[in-house]
Image: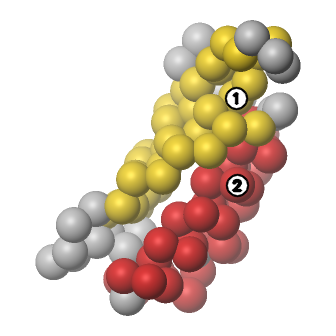
C-alpha cells in the first residue's frame, strides 16, 4: 500500500504527516493486501456557520476494481482524517 498525502494552504510538518499516516495505516491494515494506493488530500473549507473546517478527501485505488472516493469534514485535521478513514473502511467492506 502506497500512501500519498498532501495539503493545500498550509505546510504539512513531519510530525503531522507521520500522525496522519499512522491513523490511516492502522485503520486500513486488514485491507492492505487489496489496496494498491491511498491518496489523501486535506484542505481548509470555509463554512458560514462554523468558520473554517478541514476537509479530508481519500481516494483508495483497488486492483481490478473501481477506485473509492470519500470526503469528510471536521474541526481539525485529525478529526477529518478519522471520519474519512472510517467511511472508506465501510465502503471497502461493502466492495470486498
**In the image, what residue occupies the spot 45% across and 77% down?**
92
**Crowding near pointer 1: few (<14 within 10 Å), some, many (20+)?**
many
Classify residue 13 by image quadrant. top right
> What SS does tag 2 mark?
helix
Q: Quadrant of the N terminus?
A: bottom left
- The Cα atoms of the two marked residues, 2 and 1, are separated by 11 Å
Instruction: Report how many numbered discs are placed on residues in the image.
Output: 2
Which coloring applies here? secondary structure
Position of residue 23 relative to residue 31, above or below, is above
Q: Earlier in the sequence, mark 2 or mark 1?
A: 1
* Label 1 SS: strand
| Residue 7 visible (yes or no) | yes
Q: Is residue 19 left or right of residue 90?
A: right
Q: Position of residue 12 (x, y in %)?
A: 65, 26
Closer to the camera in the image, 18 or 77:
77
Determine whether, in the image, residue 44 is placed left or right of residue 38.
Answer: right
Residue 5 placement (x, y as % from top left) = 51, 41
Residue found 62% across the figure and 54% down from its top:
84
Name the residue that disc number 1 marks: 54
Measured as percent of width and height from the top left, residue 37 is found at 35, 61
Q: Can residue 14 be seen in this view?
A: no
Label 2 belongs to which residue? 83
Whether residue 45 sits left or right of residue 4 in the image: it is right
Amino acid at each position: 500500500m502506497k500512501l500519498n498525502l498532501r495539503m493545500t494552504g498550509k505546510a504539512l510538518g513531519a510530525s503531522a504527516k507521520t500522525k496522519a499516516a499512522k491513523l490511516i495505516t492502522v485503520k486500513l491494515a486488514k485491507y492492505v493486501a487489496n489496496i494498491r494506493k491511498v491518496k489523501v488530500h486535506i484542505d481548509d473549507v470555509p463554512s458560514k456557520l462554523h468558520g473554517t473546517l478541514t476537509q479530508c478527501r481519500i481516494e483508495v485505488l483497488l486492483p481490478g476494481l473501481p477506485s473509492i472516493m470519500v470526503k469528510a469534514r471536521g474541526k481539525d485535521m485529525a478529526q477529518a482524517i478519522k471520519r474519512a478513514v472510517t467511511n472508506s473502511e465501510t465502503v471497502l467492506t461493502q466492495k470486498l
